[in-house]
Image (spheres, grey):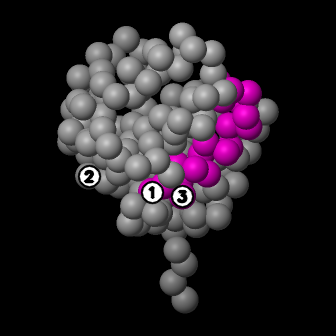
Amino acid sequence: MTENPHLTLAEVEAVARAAHQGQTDKAGRPYAEHLAAVADGVRARGGDEEQIAAAWLHDAVEDDALSEQWLHEATLSRRTKDMVRAVTKRAGEPPEAYAARILATPGALLVKEADLAHNADPARLARLDEPTRTRLTEKYARMRTLLGLPDDRPYD
């Protein structure tokens, strides 16, 4: 009998939800809603299980919800770990370097595309004050440009 050495998607989702328990987004919504939307966005864009797992974990290390040590030791594929690391922003890192790392990591662009799509969703942005909405809209558009993604992508 062969055992799957990696966490299942359901297990990854449970870990991510537990790690972000009690956290909210900028609009005060439970952070797990964002994680689920990004995972659904990856799935809708044809992403595979490793990319969906990375979507669930895409902010975990960056937000200190899980440690880099946890990621290193987790029973996840190397590719999933690489994608999580690629989409994890580093303190003081220029956006150009961040985008270059995403583009250089197989599978990571789709995860970031789904993340940007949810972050830039007009309904989600509408909950924010005007200065924050303007700043984030510009930030997300710039990252889409750096990643070579079209601006007219429909939102999920």
Mark 2 vs mark 1: in front: 1
The answer to which quarter of the image holds residue 145 is top left
Q: Is residue 21 left or right of residue 120?
A: right
Amino acid type of the residue tagged 2 in the rendering: Pro
Q: State the residue at coordinates (41%, 49%).
A: 154
Q: Secondary structure at mark 1?
A: helix
Q: Residues within 10 Å of mark 3 (few under 14, many from 20)?
A: some
Earlier in the chain: of badge 2 and badge 3, it is 3
Amino acid type of the residue tagged 1 in the rendering: Val
The answer to which quarter of the image holds residue 79 is bottom left
Q: Nearer the viewer, residue 82 or 98?
A: 98
Q: State the residue at coordinates (55%, 89%).
A: 1
Mark 2 vs mark 3: in front: 3
Above-or-below relation of 121 to 142: below
Q: Secondary structure at mark 3?
A: helix
Label 2 sits on residue = 106
Circle number at residue 40? 3
Amino acid type of the residue tagged 3 in the rendering: Asp
Q: Which residues are magenta?
A: 24-42
Circle number at residue 104? none
Label 1 sits on residue = 42
